[in-house]
């Protein structure tokens, strides 16, 4: 039976009321009546709700072994919950490689067939993305371009033009290819759009970060590969100068842990660092043995492009990791006010640092070893639409039938 009070309320007022609810309760309102179900299922409501709500949840998953998902609630009381995808999924089949914090969309890579899928675990909507026809090799990195105010999206793939022998000489040439959801097709950029730089792998467990029309990928060298989506050109942002000349390139003065990995690989950006957006700026948090430094990227736009450089914004003592001789700890989230930090045996302990009060609090413990491959994503569950998508309630494609229903179990985890 329809609720007479809701029936006579203006739609603008209903939108203001329901969009202020946490997503869990907003979804429950769909059961009130058919009109509310239609109203909340509308893409305009999803956009309005996403813009109004900001979640404080970290989604913990393995970059290469998508067997276990964890949800870390950063709001008191802090909780850590895990969900296994169940048996029957080969570790090499599926890999969640990107999660959009603004729209709640997850980009999944199916490694056996080399195609992608954009998926919203809350609504169950998904869209299969074919591999690029312009390149046989798999991309070195991929980035998601999407806005909460629009249902359309783009994928930007980064490929290396040089072969292994040429890369061993210390140089790389990157080319970019773009998938547009509106056109449902890939397109390659011409040779003038390529960028040449020193050879380096991309940092593990660091997502591509989209901010102000540009995608950013952190590399293990500490440099950032940036791609301007509007002008469709890339450039390199050098790592902070004081880090270059201070300790990271000089292992004799290296005040970070002297573990086997550092002795073997040198600088590991992405292991002892967090890379993302804090207070509207591209931010890099680096954990050293005795201190943690927060860098913010300053950007100045000009007629012939833009200039950017890192500025040291904050520095505070790494009191937690000083207790452990073998580890620096690992920052996994930063929002300008608090830092979420892993430390202890195998980085299982979760700490929260309040910058203003200079207080460290232990808020939980991970269920599994947090190695440098496992990634942490700031996740906001939303009702964001995926254009031209299918739904898990429909008959899925044969290649997706065994996997996507299991991923839809994330709904119960994320709405807890």
Image (cartoon, rainbow, N blue to C red):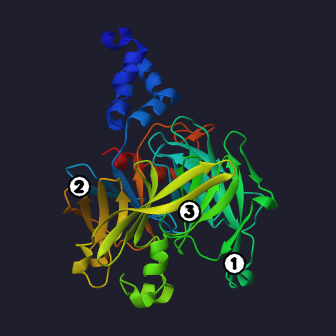
The residue nearer to you, when weighing 78 against 117, is: 78
Element under disc 1: strand
Around disc 3, counting alpha carbons within 10 Å, would you say few (fewer than 14), some (14 to 19), or many (20 or more)? many
Q: Position of residue 245 (x, y in %)?
A: 48, 79
Residue 345 in the image, given as x and y percentages of width and height: 27, 78
**Could you tell me which residue is drawn at 53 percent across and 36 percent down?**
385
Quickly name the residue at label 2. Answer: 356
Mark pair 3, 1: CA separation: 17 Å
C-alpha separation, residue under disc 2 versus residue under disc 3 = 30 Å
> Is 409 situated above or below 327?
above
State yes or no: discs 3 and 1 in contact (Cβ < 8 Å). no
Q: Is residue 12 above or below residue 363?
A: above
- Does label 2 or label 3 sit earlier along the sequence? 3
Q: Quadrant of residue 195?
A: bottom right
Closer-to-camera residue (53/22): 53
Q: Which residue is mark 1?
A: 171
Residue 46, label in figure: none
Q: Position of residue 276 (x, y in %)?
A: 45, 57
On the rendered structure, is 80 left or right of 156? left
Residue in front for this viewpoint, 136 or 269: 269
Q: Are there few (<14), some (14-19), or many (20+) residues within 10 Å of tag 2?
A: few
How far apart marks 1 and 2 lie (CA) works out to 43 Å
Residue under label 3: 217
């Amino acid at each position: 039976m329809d609720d007479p009070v809701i029936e006579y309320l203006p739609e603008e007022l209903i939108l203001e009321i329901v969009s202020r609810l946490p997503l869990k309760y907003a979804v429950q309102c769909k059961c009130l009546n058919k009109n509310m179900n239609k109203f909340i299922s509308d893409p305009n409501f999803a956009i309005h709700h996403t813009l109004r709500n900001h979640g404080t949840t970290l989604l913990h998953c393995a970059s290469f072994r998508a067997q276990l998902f964890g949800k870390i609630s950063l709001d008191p009381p802090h909780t850590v919950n895990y969900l296994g995808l169940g048996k029957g999924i080969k570790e090499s089949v599926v890999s969640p490689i990107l999660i959009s914090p603004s729209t709640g969309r997850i980009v999944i890579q199916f490694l056996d067939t080399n195609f992608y899928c954009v998926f919203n675990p809350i609504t169950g909507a998904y869209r299969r993305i074919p591999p690029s026809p312009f390149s046989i090799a798999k991309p070195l990195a991929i980035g998601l371009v999407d806005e909460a105010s629009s249902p359309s999206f783009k994928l930007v793939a980064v490929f290396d033009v040089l072969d292994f022998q040429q890369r061993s000489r210390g140089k790389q040439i990157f080319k970019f290819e773009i998938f547009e959801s509106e056109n449902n097709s890939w397109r390659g950029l011409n040779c003038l759009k390529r960028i040449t730089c020193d050879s380096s792998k991309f940092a593990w467990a660091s997502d591509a970060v989209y901010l102000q029309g540009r995608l950013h990928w952190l590399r293990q060298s500490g440099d950032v590969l940036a791609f301007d989506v509007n002008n469709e050109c890339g450039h390199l942002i050098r790592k902070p100068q004081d880090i270059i000349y201070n300790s990271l390139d000089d292992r004799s003065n290296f005040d970070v842990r002297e573990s086997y990995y550092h002795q073997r690989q040198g600088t590991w950006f992405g292991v002892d660092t967090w890379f993302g957006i804090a207070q509207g700026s591209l931010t890099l948090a680096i954990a050293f043995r005795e201190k943690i430094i927060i860098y913010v990227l300053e950007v100045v736009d000009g007629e012939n492009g833009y200039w950017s450089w890192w500025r040291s914004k904050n520095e505070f003592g790494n009191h937690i990791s000083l207790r452990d001789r073998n580890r620096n700890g690992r920052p996994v989230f930063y929002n300008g006010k608090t830092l979420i930090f892993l430390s202890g045996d195998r980085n299982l302990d979760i700490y929260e640092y309040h910058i203003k009060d200079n207080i460290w609090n232990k808020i939980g413990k991970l269920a599994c070893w947090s190695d440098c491959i496992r990634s942490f994503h700031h996740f906001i569950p939303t009702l964001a639409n995926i254009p031209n998508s299918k739904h898990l309630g429909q008959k899925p494609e044969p290649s997706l039938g065994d996997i996507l229903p299991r991923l839809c179990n994330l709904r119960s985890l994320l709405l807890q």
